[in-house]
């Protein structure tokens, strides 16, 4: 025995959500059907609308339902510094950390030749146009500290070379508040190599 | 800063799902928008269809998109034994445990006067009609072993009294494979009171 075909189909389909296995999908389906049909209808509608309307900002490629996103439209951000990130979630994390006043460019991924993801898939032509406008003085390559993120940063660095733009990369180091014994070796050796004179730290 | 209004709305709405907090909702929204738009569209559509079409079986009240569910329609089940459960999930658990060949009746909850949930809300009029048909010889009151489940079982028992129907309740006891020291006291004392002669056990 199982639930009715349509209920079973709902449980299967809920598994498109990350981290949702069969048991969780069953609990979700039962909750929506038994206790929150209005919430379920709202979810179906908002999901449909969002997938229909949310695209990429024409200027920075972040997720937005507008042609150009609010951050790109804001007159209070510095056009001279552009921060390249892999995802909108990375962009949000940097914004929430606070302190950065420049603009962003979102790749939606990283170069991955084996998966057929090349420069055009991560918007590098649009990034080149942006640099050619001449306002960007510093390009912060804030791709992930992974093999793919590093390779993508190097590719962009090579692409931009010779155009008078300063390139930078987020500092590697031990995470604040962490204990050295739990920091992985690669990070630790990077932190050693990047050590600063004590007087340079406040 | 936050995501665009529509993306924020999607994240909020995903929280209608049980167990989904702000971080999980963000991860789900990003996954659907960045990596699985087809899956997201399918989810919106199936959810909408299920909420539109899935109702209660006219005979047993379980969740189904059909007028009468497959189990009620099956000629291979015993009309003489009717098992009353609180939810379709309980029904499924009993079916998956195997061995029961009778039919079901689903309350979709339990009596809860403080929440305004009375006999009509859990389908007791329909249950009475079913008993009045005269085929049911045994009614298994498989409501949850909770205060509300017990109270509901007693209410139904009183309602059915004098109609020649044998009433039964699931046996209480120590769960198989469990260790006595971890079994709660209430269960343990019930298991003691319900002890059987050794020869009765195979
Ligand atoms: Zn933008
Ligand atoms: Zn039925």
Image (cartoon, coloured by chain):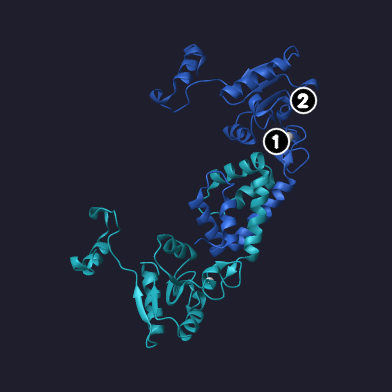
Chain colours: A blue, B cyan
Query: Is residue A101 visible to the viewer in this orientation of the structure?
Result: no
Query: Going by the image, does A163 lie left or right of A143?
Result: right
Q: Is residue B89 above or below residue A194?
A: below
Q: Is mark 1 within 8 Å of ligand 1?
A: yes
Instruction: Report the image quarter containing ligand 1.
Output: top right
Q: CA distance from mark 1 to mark 2?
A: 15 Å
> Which quadrant of the figure has residue A94?
top right
Task: Count residues near mark 2 (Cα–Cα under 10 Å), then give few for <14, some for 14-19, many for 20+.
Answer: few
Q: Quadrant of the C terminus of chain B?
A: bottom left
Q: Is residue A35 visible?
A: yes
Residue A11, picture quadrant: bottom right
Q: Earlier in the sequence, mark 1 or mark 2?
A: 1
Q: Mark 2 falls within which chain? A: A
Q: Position of residue A46 (x, y in %)?
A: 67, 53
Which dot marks residue A62? Answer: 1
Give residue B42's position: percent from left, percent from top: 66, 51
Which residue was labeled with disc 2?
A: A125
Element under label 2? Answer: helix
């Amino acid at each position: 025995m199982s639930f009715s075909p349509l209920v079973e189909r709902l449980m299967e389909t809920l598994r498109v959500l990350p981290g949702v296995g069969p048991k969780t999908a069953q609990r979700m389906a039962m909750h929506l059907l038994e206790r929150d049909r209005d919430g379920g209808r709202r979810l179906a509608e908002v999901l449909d609308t969002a997938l229909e309307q949310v695209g990429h900002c024409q200027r920075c490629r972040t997720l937005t339902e507008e042609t150009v996103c609010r951050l790109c439209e804001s007159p209070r951000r510095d056009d001279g510094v552009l921060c390249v990130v892999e995802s909108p979630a990375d962009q949000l994390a940097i914004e929430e950390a606070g302190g950065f006043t420049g603009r962003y460019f979102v790749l939606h991924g990283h170069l991955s030749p084996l998966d057929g993801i090349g420069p055009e898939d991560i918007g590098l032509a649009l990034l080149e146009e942006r640099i050619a406008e001449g306002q960007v003085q510093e390009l912060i390559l804030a791709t992930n500290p992974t093999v793919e993120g590093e390779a993508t940063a190097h590719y962009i660095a090579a692409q931009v070379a010779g155009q008078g733009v300063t390139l930078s990369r987020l500092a590697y180091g031990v995470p604040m508040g962490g204990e050295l014994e739990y920091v992985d070796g690669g990070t630790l050796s990077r932190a050693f190599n990047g050590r600063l004179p004590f007087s340079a730290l406040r």
